[in-house]
Image: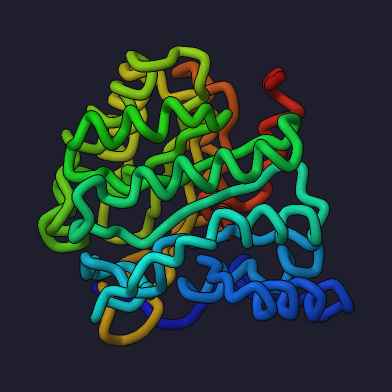
């Protein structure tokens, strides 16, 4: 069954303030992309008002065409060699203390863009070693050397979203593999146990509660530290349809279960997205 009308808990009432234009202008001047804009994130206004944004590297076009995602699927762009430097400049301009870097998936590149991720991390650290860097990476098609490249650049947090339950992978993200994503998070800890790992789930795609709880157990079995859970919102009628609007009480239930399983930090709410209030992990976990 498909649902259409949004419940009250998903309706956002925010006013645009001067910071919004400042962030927008900074991004335009440096020709930088954000997942906030490209994925049509519902929290864009709030985050830009707070002078935060999630940078999206490696172009605007993705080599995969996941049914839930608003990122464009088309002709892939040449990677901008100056992008790491530009992101470092934006980090200074926005006075960011916690920087989140994500990307389109680039299966066309031999390393999936891992080397570029590493260059961005290093460029930010050259500005200030105390800046917390969180990278939200693709699966690199299971390429362990590519993952090692990112790990060795020493971001504090490596995020890789599991997105949904295994049963729905075939229809929601057919070019990904559930086990490959779980194995990636496991491998990060094997390569460098000091790096925090993070993952995220969308709900409302037709999954069952028990399926979500099994995914949470799988994530904890590979020592995933941080978790985000949010409501899936279809970007358009062409995308995978919303099957259900999950109530805030269910999100609280998931959070309680996740914390009992041992996650250090859990953000579980209808409007939560992977990088929403990302810096909050600092208040619950010591990162030096």
- Is 86 placed above or below 29 here? above
**Position of residue 213 in the picture relative to residue 178 (left or right):** right
Pick whichever, 177 or 137, lies toward us. Answer: 137
Name, please, the residue furthest toward the bottom: 237
Pick whichever, 189 or 123, lies toward us. Answer: 123
- Is 114 placed above or below 27 here? above
**Position of residue 105 in the picture relative to residue 15 (left or right):** left
- Is 189 placed above or below 96 here? above
Residue 48 occupies quadrant: bottom right
Across and down, in percent, residue 255 comes to 53, 34
Across and down, in percent, residue 44 comes to 64, 70
Quarter of the picture containing the N terminus is bottom left
> Residue at coordinates 88% horizontally, 78% vertically from top-left?
18
**Position of residue 4 in the picture relative to residue 110 (left or right):** right
> Residue at coordinates 25% horizontally, 45% vertically from top-left?
111
Across and down, in percent, residue 188 comes to 36, 24
Name, please, the residue furthest toward the front: 81
> Residue at coordinates 40% horizontally, 35% vertically from top-left?
150
């Amino acid at each position: 069954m498909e649902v259409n009308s949004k419940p009250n808990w998903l309706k956002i009432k925010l006013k645009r303030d001067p910071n919004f234009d400042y962030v927008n202008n900074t991004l335009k001047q440096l020709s930088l992309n954000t997942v906030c804009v490209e994925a049509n994130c519902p929290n864009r206004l709030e985050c830009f008002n707070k002078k935060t944004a999630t940078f999206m590297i490696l172009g605007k076009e993705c080599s995969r065409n996941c049914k839930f995602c608003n990122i464009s699927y088309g002709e892939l762009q040449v990677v901008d060699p100056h992008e790491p430097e530009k992101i470092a400049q934006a980090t200074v301009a926005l006075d960011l203390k916690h920087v989140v870097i994500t990307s389109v998936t680039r299966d066309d590149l031999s390393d999936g863009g891992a080397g570029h991720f590493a260059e961005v991390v290093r460029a930010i650290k050259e500005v200030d070693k105390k800046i917390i860097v969180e990278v939200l990476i693709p699966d690199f098609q299971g390429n362990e050397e590519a993952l090692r490249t990112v790990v060795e650049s020493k971001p504090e947090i490596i995020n890789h979203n599991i997105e949904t339950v295994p049963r729905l992978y075939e229809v929601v993200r057919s070019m990904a593999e559930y086990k490959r994503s779980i194995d990636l998070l496991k491998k990060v800890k094997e390569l460098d146990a000091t790096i925090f790992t993070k993952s995220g789930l969308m709900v409302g795609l037709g999954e069952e509660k028990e399926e979500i709880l099994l995914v949470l157990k799988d994530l904890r079995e590979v020592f995933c530290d941080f978790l985000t859970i949010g409501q899936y919102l279809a970007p358009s009628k062409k995308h995978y349809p919303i099957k259900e609007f999950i109530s805030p009480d269910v999100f609280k239930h998931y959070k309680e279960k996740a914390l009992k399983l041992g996650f250090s930090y859990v953000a579980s709410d209808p409007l939560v997205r992977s990088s929403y209030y990302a810096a909050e992990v600092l208040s619950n976990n010591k990162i030096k």
